[in-house]
Image: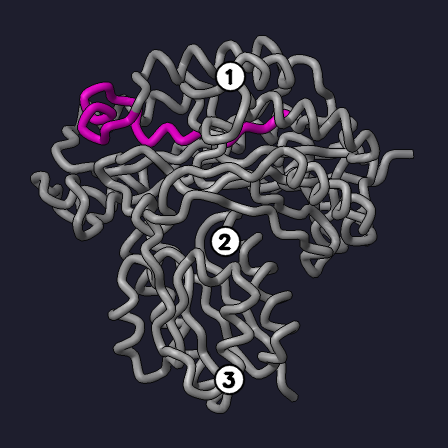
Amino acid sequence: MSKIDIITFGCRLNSYESEVMRAHAGAAGLDDAVIVNTCAVTAEAVRQARQAIRRARRERPGAKIVVTGCAAQIDPARFAAMDEVDHVVGNHDKLQAATFAGLSLEGTERIVVNDIMSVTETAGHLIDGFGARARAFVQIQNGCNHRCTFCVIPYGRGPSRSVPAGGVVDQVRRLVENGYAEIVLTGVDITAYGADLPGATTLGKLVRKVLKLVPELPRLRISSIDSVEADADLLAAIADEERLMPHLHLSLQSGDDLTLKRMKRRHARADSVAFCAEARRLRPDMVFGADLIAGFPTETEDMFQSSVSLVDDCGLTLLHVFPFSPREGTPAARMPQLHGAVIARRAAELREKGVAALKAHLAGAKGARIQVLMENERQGRAPDFTPVRLASMQETGALVEARIDGDDGSALIATVAA
C-alpha cells in the first residue's frame, strides 16, 4: 500500500513544517514517499538523520526518499551523495506546493535548494490537523538575525521574518474549530517577532491579539524564547492572561558570563535570574524549562558550575542539556575544544541536576487539582507542561480535571477529579 511517511527531527517548527509538507505531498499525488525532515543543531542530529535515511530505504525499497530540513539546507551535497536519497529539498522550497508537484514528475532536479539568505518573507500555512488531536503548532516566525558562535541554524533558516498577525489568528481559529484545545506559537527566534512588519508589533502584542480574537481557544502556549528580548506586553500577558500557559522554555545556554560572551549571547547571568524572578512574581505558578550547553570551548570547571547553580538560582525545572558539538564553519568550532570525556561528564551532571529539580517540582504538586490536556489515552500535560499520567483511560485531546495523587519520579500520577 502506497503512503507518505514523514520522519521529523529537531524543533517544534520542524513538526509544523512536516504537516505542511504532508499536505503538499498528498495534493501532488506523491503517495509513495518517505520525507526526512532533518535538524542541524548538533552533529548527532545529522548522524541520526543519515541513519534514518538508510533504514527507510531498507524498509521502503520502492519509495521516493526526499531529504529536507536544516541539515539538507546547509550541506545538500552530503545528502545527495547518499545512494538512498532521490531528492534533496531546501527549507524554503519544502514549503512550496510547486516543489512537490515537481517531485511527482520524472526528470525533476535531484537537488532543489535555494539561497536561504535571500528569503525575506514567511507566509502562514493553513493546516487542518496534526494527526492525534492534542496540541497543534502555528508558525509565527522563521529565521534568525543573531550569530551565536556555536550555532549553524541561521544558515539553515535564513534571516528573521514574521508571519503577519492576521494570518496567525486565522490559523489559530481554524485549528480550534477543528477541535484543538491547545495551540503553540512557534518559530526559530520568536521574541524577534514583528521587527520586520509594519508598525510596532511584538510577540506580546501578538499573544494578546490571538487571545482576544479567538476567545474559544482554551490554551495558548509559546515555544522557546530569548528572555532578554521579552517585551512589556508579553510580561503583561503572563500576569493577566490565564489562557496563556504558565510555562516558558528559555534559551539560556550557560550560567557563566564569560562563556556567554564567547557564545555571543545577548544576556548576562544576572539577566536570566532577574527575568525568572519577575516572571514568577507576575505568575507564581510559572515553570521554566531551559536549554543549556555543557562543555563549551574554554569552559573551566568553575564556569561549568555556574551553569549548574543557575538551575537553582532561576528555579529551572525542565532541562534540555546539549553536550557541546562543534559545527563546521562556526567560530566556536575554531576555539580550543574540551576533551569529549569532560563534555560527557558535565552533560551527565547537568542532566542529574535537572532530574533532581523535576523530582522536587513533582513532589510539591501532590494534592493539587489541575486541568490535563491528554496527549494519548493515559498521559497528558498540566498547564505548566509537567507530564501527568492518569489512572483511567481518557480521550486523546480532551481537557480533563484531575487530582494529583503523587508521582513516579518523572511524571505526576493523577485521578479524574470528582
Residue 83 lies in what quarter of the image? bottom left
Q: Nearer the viewer, residue 384 or 191?
A: 191
Secondary structure beneath label 3: loop
Q: Residue at x 30, y 17 (%)?
A: 268
Report if the CB atoms under discs 3 and 1 are less than 8 Å apart: no
Label 2, on which residue?
A: 14
Q: Relative to 125, is 180 on the left or the right?
A: right
Position in image of residue 59 (x %, y %): 49, 85
Within 10 Å of the Cα at label 3, are there few (<14), some (14-19), or many (20+) other Cα atoms?
A: few
Q: Which residues are magenta?
A: 246-265
Position in image of residue 360 (x %, y %): 54, 27
For badge 3, the amino acid type reads Leu
Label 1, on which residue?
A: 231
Residue 24 lies in what quarter of the image? bottom right
Secondary structure beneath label 1: loop
Which of labels 3 and 2 is toward the front?
A: 3
For badge 1, the amino acid type reads Asp
Q: Earlier in the sequence, mark 3 or mark 2?
A: 2
Give residue 105's mark.
Answer: 3
Q: Relative to 70, is 234 on the left or the right?
A: right
Secondary structure beneath label 2: helix
**Cα–Cα span, label 1 and label 2:** 25 Å
Q: Quadrant of the C terminus?
A: top right
